[in-house]
Amino acid sequence: MARIFITYILPLLLPTLMYFAWTVWVRKQVQANRAKAKTEGLKHTEGDHTEAEDYDIKMPWFRLILTGVGLMLIGLVLSVFFSPKNEPGSTYRPPYEKNGTIVPGEYVTPKSN
C-alpha cells in the first residue's frame, strides 16, 4: 500500500497541494497589505498590491495534472532502477526460520541438470 501511495497517489496530489498552499499564502499577503494600507490611511497607488485584481488567481488545472503525471512517470522509472534485481526464471523464496534465526527472503535461480 505504501508503494502505491508513494508511486501513484503522492505524485498526483503533491503539485495540487503545493499550489493550494501557495494561493492561501498569497491571499494572506493581500489581506495584510490591505490592512496595512487602511491603518496608514494610504490610498491605492500603482504597484502597492492591495487590490484583489493584483492577485487574480486562476486554477491552472492543465499544468497541475501535467506536473502530477510527470512526477508519477519519474516515480515509475525510478522504481525500475531501485527494485531488486533477479535473474530471468528465478523464483522468490520468502523469509523462513532456520535453526532459530530468520533467513531473509531472496531470489533463487533454478539449478540446471
Image (tube, helix red, strand yellow):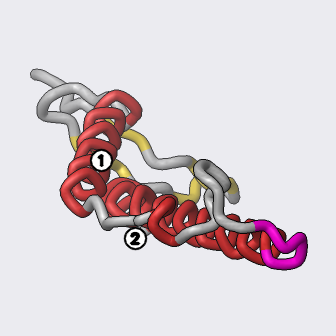
Point 69% across, 65% down: residue: 29
Q: Residue furthest top?
A: 113
> In the image, residue 69 lies at what x, y percent?
23, 50
> In the image, residue 110 lies at what x, y percent?
19, 32
Boundaries of the magenta span: 38-42
Q: Residue furthest right?
A: 40
Q: Is residue 111 above or below residue 32?
A: above
Q: Is residue 73 above or below residue 32?
A: above
Prevalent SS, magenta region: helix
Dot 1 amino acid type: Thr
- How packed is label 2: few (under 14 Cα within 10 Å), some, or many (20 or more)? few
Point 20% across, 35% down: residue: 90
- How packed is label 1: few (under 14 Cα within 10 Å), some, or many (20 or more)? some
Q: Report, in whole angstroms, how far the alpha carbon at label 2 lies from the one at label 1.
A: 23 Å
Question: Residue 110, labelled with which disc?
Answer: none
Kind of element beneath mark 1: helix
Would you name the residue on which mark 1 appears?
67
Question: Residue 1, labelled with which disc?
Answer: 2
Q: Is residue 78 above or below residue 17?
A: above
Kind of element beneath mark 2: loop
